[in-house]
Amino acid sequence: SGGGTNGLTVTGNANFDSNTLFVDSVNNMVGIGTSSPQAILEIKSSATKALRVSGVDGSGYGLIEAWNSPLNANIFSLSRQDGVNSGDLSISAFSGIGLTGGRTTSAATSSYHMYIKSTGVVGIGTTTPAAKLSVNAASNALGFYMAGYANTTADLFRISTSTLTATSTAFVIDSQGR
């Protein structure tokens, strides 16, 4: 039903244009491209692009944010980092960013492959890095592997210490492995 200045009011499920937009009134879910949404909003598409977010102010940022309730803390956001490098992706999170791959079930909770804490420290194989970069491996796994181009004269690996005015080399492995 509808009418007047109040707009359109629908009671019960609503199906627009054969599941282009479906409103499940029993479970309070919306499906775009599906008549059986499994979340508050589910987008299902056979096209190559299922979702596009565009900035309306012309900045081209494009932004996806998740907030807690009652909307007083940004949980995470994805955006285009404009002004740094064109096309970069900025990922922001409340206390850290965990990355994992190869999962076939639920999302990871603590076994991230890489974790970046809000303090800027990075853990590979750990969510509690003890330094700027911490690499932890299983007891029977190779913890660190480095390969370089053998026909170059550049250093393969260098550890340096820095101050505000100078950099001092503490350890070098050159292209010959010395």
Image (cartoon, rainbow, N blue to C red):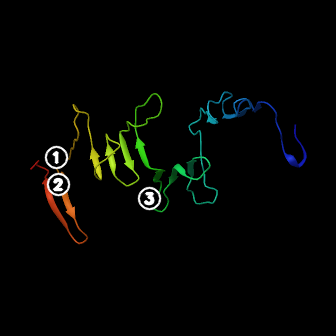
From the top left corner, tell me how far across and down residue 172 is, in percent.
14, 54
Horizontal side, residue 24 vs residue 127: left or right: right
Which quadrant of the structure image shows residue 30? top right
User: Alpha-carbon distance for marks 3 and 2?
Assistant: 28 Å
Could you tell which of marks 3 and 2 lies nearer the N-terminus? 3
Which quadrant of the structure image shows residue 146? top left
Residue holding disc 2 = 155
Could you say which disc has been placed on residue 85 in the image? 3
From the top left corner, tell me how far across and down residue 94 is, in percent.
48, 50
The residue at 40%/32% (across/down) is 102
Query: Disc 2 vs disc 1: Cβ atoms closer than 8 Å?
Result: no
Could you tell which of marks 3 and 1 lies nearer the N-terminus? 3
Instruction: Work out whether 130 lies above or below 136.
Output: below
Local secondary structure at mark 1? loop
Q: Amino acid at mark 3?
A: Asn
Local secondary structure at mark 2? loop
Which quadrant of the structure image shows residue 165? bottom left
From the top left corner, tell me how far across and down residue 149 is, in percent.
20, 47
Give the residue at the far bottom of this rendering.
165
Could you tell me how many numbered marks the image carries? Answer: 3
For the N terminus, the quadrant is: top right
The residue at 36%/54% (across/down) is 120
Q: Amino acid at mark 2?
A: Asp
From the top left corner, tell me how far across and down residue 9 is, in percent.
83, 39
* Dot in front, 3 or 1: 3
